[in-house]
Structure formats: C-alpha cells, structure tokens
Image: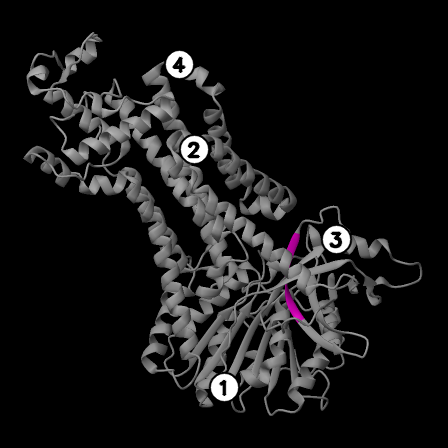
Amino acid sequence: MREYCSGDGLSEGWRGLNRVCGEDEGMELLPWSIVDDVTDAEVQTWPILTYEDTQLGAQFNTSVSVDRGLFQIGYQTIIKEQGGIIMGKQSNSTHTQTHTSSVFWYFLTSGIFRYAILGFWGLVVLFGTIHNFVRYLTSSSILRSKTIARCQSFLGRYFAVPPIMTTRQTSQFFSIPSTPRLQTIIISIYFIISIVLMCAPYHAFSENLYFTKKSTQLWRYIGDRAGALVINNLPVMWLFATRNNILLWATGWDFATFNTFHRWIGRACAILIFLHGMAVCIYQNKELGTEVFLPLWKDVDWYMGVVAGCSIILTTLFASSPIRKVVYDLFLIVHQSFAVACLVGLWYHLPVDGPDYVNFIWPCIAAWSFDRLIRIFRLLTWNKFASYSSAEYNRDANVIQLKTRVRQITSPYPGSYYYVYGWRSLKFWESHPFTLSGWNTINTTEESYTELKFLISVQNGFTSRLRSQLLRHEKPGIDVSSEARKACISVEGPYGSHFRPWNSQTALFVIGGAGITIWSIWCRVASMLIRGSGGVKIIWAVKNPAFYQFVYERYMAAWEDVFASTDIELSLDVYFTTSPKNASDDEISGSENHVEPSESIKNWDTVISPSSSSKSHIATEKVRSEEGPRNPGAGPLKTTFFQGRPLIDELVKSQIETLQSSGVNHLAFVGCGPATMAHDIRLSYVSSSDNGQVAVDFHLAPFGW
C-alpha cells in the first residue's frame, strides 16, 4: 500500500478495508502501525504476487509484494464494482488518463446518478411552481401584461391543454387515457433519462478479480444499476401518490396530474425491478453455479428482495384502469397491502448493499405518514361527532343528493371536492372524492354549522352500496325518491385547485352529467366572476330528463336568486343524450351519432319551435331541438332543450364568434365531464384558442378518478 498510495490515501484505504472486514466478516484488521516500520530493503526480499498467481490459487506463508499489473487490475475491479473513482492526487499519467476517460461513466454508475432522477422531477416541480407563481401575480389586472398573457396562452394551447391523441377515436390507448401533451412530454423525457442511465457504458473487462466471465460481469452490473434506479424512484413515487402533498399547492396542479406521474413511475419501476431480478438471477446461476444459487433462496435478504420486487410488479398490474373500474375494492386492498410488503421487503433486502440505500425507505414512510396524519386532522376538525347527515335517492334520475353538517372552520370554495367516508359500511376505511355542489351557512342560538351538499351519480362500488342502504330502509307506501334518510357520513377536505378568472367578461361552461355541480358551486360567486354586463352560457349534456328534473327542483331556484339582482344574462342548453336508466356517464360525448327525441320532451308544455341560431348547432336534420324559457317571466334563466349529443367543437367556435361580434375580448371557459367528453373539451379549446381577439382562461375540472 505504501508503494502505490500517498499518506492520506493510505490512511483512508486502511480505514475502508477495516470497515469492509467488520461489516462482512465481523473482524478488524491489525493497526497499520505494526507494519509501518518495515524498510524498503525488507520489502525487496518478499515474493511478488502476480495476477497469474491469483488464478492458480497460489499460497504464501510470508508477506508478499503486489505486482503493479495486479494492482492495476485490482484498482479497476474496485472502481468498476463500487461505481466510483479515487479522487485523490494521482501519481502518474495512467491514473490521470483513467480518471479523465471515466468521468461520464462515473456520473452514470456511481451514487451521483441517483440525483438524475430526483433532479429531473425537481426541475419539473420547479417549473410548475414558477408558472403558478406568475399566474397568481398576473391574475390581477394591474400586473397583467400582453407578453405574459401571450406566453401563457401559447403554453396552454400547444402544451398544457391539448391531449397527445387528437381525435375522439384515440382518447384511450389500451385502456390508458390520453394525457395532455405537456404531461406526455414530461413522462417521455423521464423514460428517456431512465433508458440512458440503463444503457450507458458498463466498462466490463476481462481479468476482473470478482468475476470469472465478462458476460456474468455485465449481468451483475445491469442488475445492480436497475435495482439502484428503482430505489431512487421510490420517494418520488410515494410522494406523488399522496393527496396531502405540498407540491399540489406549490404548482397549482390537480391531484390527477400527480397521480398520472405516480402511475408511470410505478410502471417504470415494475420494468426495472423485473430486469434487476432476472439479471441478478442469471449472474448468480452462471457465475456461482446451481449448487450455490439455489441455497440463496433461504437467505432472508434474498427472498425478501423477491417479495419486494413481486409486490411492485403485482401492484402495477392490479392498478390497470379496467381492474380499478370493475373491482375497485380489490385494487385498493392489493395496492395498500403490496405497498407495505414492498417497504418491508426492502428493509430486509437492502442492508446487504449498505445503509445508503436503506435511507431511501424513510422518505416513503414519511410521505405516507404525513398524508395519513393530515387526513385524520381534517376529519377531526371538520366533522362534528353528533352531526346529522342525510341522503336522498331518486330512482328515475339514479342520483343521490347528500347533505352533511360540518364545523365552520374554513369557507368552501368553487371547484373544491371532498372525500366522503361511510362509517356504517364494512369497508369503513375507504373514501371517495365528490365535487361540492353547494353549501349553506347556518347560525342559530343553539349551534352554528355549514351544511355541505353533494350531487352523486350512482355507479358501481361505494355509490351503489349507498343506494342499497337507502333502499333497504324504504317504508311501505312511501316513495323513497321523495324522502331524505339519515346517513352516517363524514367528509375530508376541502381539496382542489383554485381557478379565479375574475377579469372575464363572459363565461362558458361545458358540462356532462353530474359535472353540473361545477356550475352549481360557481354560481355562488358568478357576480364576482363576470366583469361588466357579460353573460354566462351553460352547455349541459345529461343522460335523461329525470336527471334534469331533479337538478331543476333542487338547484335552479338558487341559480336564479343569485342572478336576479344582476344584469348578467344566464342561458342553459340541455342536451338529453339517451333515455335508458342504466346508461353510463361515458356515453355523454361529442359523437355525431344522435338519437331520436324522447316522448318526455315532446309532451312538455314549455316547448316552442327553435330559432335559426339554435338550428345552426344541430348536426343532422333528425335531431330535434325545443327552445323556450323554462318559466317565461319568472327569472333570468333561459333554457333550451336538445335531443342528442352536443358537438362541442362547433358550439365553442360558435360562442366565440358571437363574442367577437359583440366586442367581448375575455372569456372564462370551464369544462367538466367523463373521459371522452373531457378529451373533446380539450380539443375544442385548442381549436378555438387561435383566435387573437378573445382571450380564453381555460379550466378543466376533474370528473372521475
């Protein structure tokens, strides 16, 4: 060591060897001082150990001097295996050349490469935070400039809003929803970085002291690098999966965006962990042989690594969209159970590689624990233990209106949603998000509370079980559709990003099904939303007239009360997409296949013939429209009825052309609907935003999860 190492390098190397001996064999080396007084003359009498001697298994009963060639081989073996370079002062040009040519490889294979993944997502979040901050500053007319407005419009039109698949027929690809273009670019760059890190040079070489074959050396390096990438992805994957994530507030992105990133990181980890397992198994079998490889399965660190890897792969498979929709309960149980199994498996698997990798488990635990603590805090602070909750189910509309009383902690806001817990269910741990449809603040001498309202379209799972509970308590001779029943419900929230286009002169809402709750809650602040005497137009695609009738009876009077004292014009175009009661919300879309009008519309007394402007919105001659005030002279709400599915792109373009002719230059465009309809809404914004005369503030509210 004295011949090939400097003083500082000698001390550091000896401490490193001592640490390795202590961790691997449980013993310590003798202190360096006992051999430090050996003279150079004594060293000259020692036999020289060469690489050939190590291959022949030569044994010596005396001290030996290491041949320079063997030292170079050992040096290369160590730095390639550990993925590092000795950064001390080099004593000759050979070392300097090795250092210079390996800088790129050092970054990729040493511990530094872990920061490539973390650094990438850090830059993504930083970009979102800066954009959100600029958007907040420019929301005021004082700070708003044309240059910033153009940049924001350019970013929204070409990156943030448009889906990567630009036709309705490709709104999904193998059950994977079409993501916005910017999200797709971010995910693609992430996969490119991962591929580059995996495919970068491995510098395998012959005469390696740890491996007998170059091929097995490559398998080992591939497996180690894939495993290291998985570990470095875990903190980000866990953080993006939590609903109480500070990054949601910093970037202004919705939970669906981070959830999309979470799923794709999970898919990448599943591929990498499979590659890690296969590469290590091939290496162990070929390098050590079957007689050594099979007994490894009895080692705790080995089979717990298999448990962790299988947990990641199975979690990814069970998280596919078809399984989530059909058997959500199974998905939830598998997801949570395998997540715990993954961390437990890694806890026993990683110590063999050193404490550095074990440290990556703690951020995962911290993110999960913080999220759960905040959930509990929200439940305890919002909900009153003796509070009253009620649920009303309408058979014809297949919809539930839920009301619950909470403490007056903070005021709800438009676009917010809450997670609803049903404590009387056997699955009391599950919670599901529902958009707030309204609220009332009650102050009496006895108590003060806020009554939250939710309009829930019944689907499979939680909503179906809630409906069954309501029907189970049905009394003979009483129509369950007209009676509200007590429900044991708690809410957690509020969640959701703020969208405040306070400078808009007019607003356009394109809504599908139960997404009408977005307008119902925005209606409360519409007087602040619209600047001047602009109007509000709502395009609502609903399954059947019964749904409309239910909303009409429960909400429309409140809408008119809000607008009664203003000069804002409010118009509602209702499109009845189908009449069967068992139709799903996914049938609401922008398809050109229209259906014939139902008898329920033909017999309405309020129907009159359509005007020429209404006829221009209809794609085929078979589609019938009926136009007229819902109740002439009773309020500012003007309702128009159509049978069929709205052609969203044409309707939005027509609305913008109308605004141009009337001199309006600022529009708030809000959309909410099922996946296919949301896809069409995005496309309609892109096609209509190229108009330079009308500035459009776009917001797409979440509909499903």
Distance from label 3 to label 1 (Cα)?
A: 45 Å
436 in magenta: yes
Distance from label 2 to label 4 (Cα)?
A: 21 Å
User: Mostly what secondary structure, the magenta segment?
Assistant: strand
Q: Horizontal and vertical percent for residue 253?
A: 47, 63
Question: Type of residue at label 3?
Answer: Trp
Instruction: From the viewer's perspective, tell me whether residue 155 is left or right of residue 334.
Output: left
Specify few, some or many for label 3: CA neighbours under 10 Å numbering under 14, 14-19, or 20 or more.
some
Residue 423, numbered circle: 3
Q: Which residue is mark 4?
A: 292
Disc nearer the start of the sequence (4/3): 4
Which is in the foreground here, disc 3 or disc 1? 3
Disc nearer the start of the sequence (2/3): 2
Q: Horizontal and vertical percent for residue 488?
A: 78, 58
572 in magenta: no
Instruction: From the viewer's perspective, tell me whether residue 671 is left or right of residue 193.
Output: right
Give the magenta range.
431-437
Q: Which residue is mark 1?
A: 505
Which is in the foreground here, disc 2 or disc 4? 2
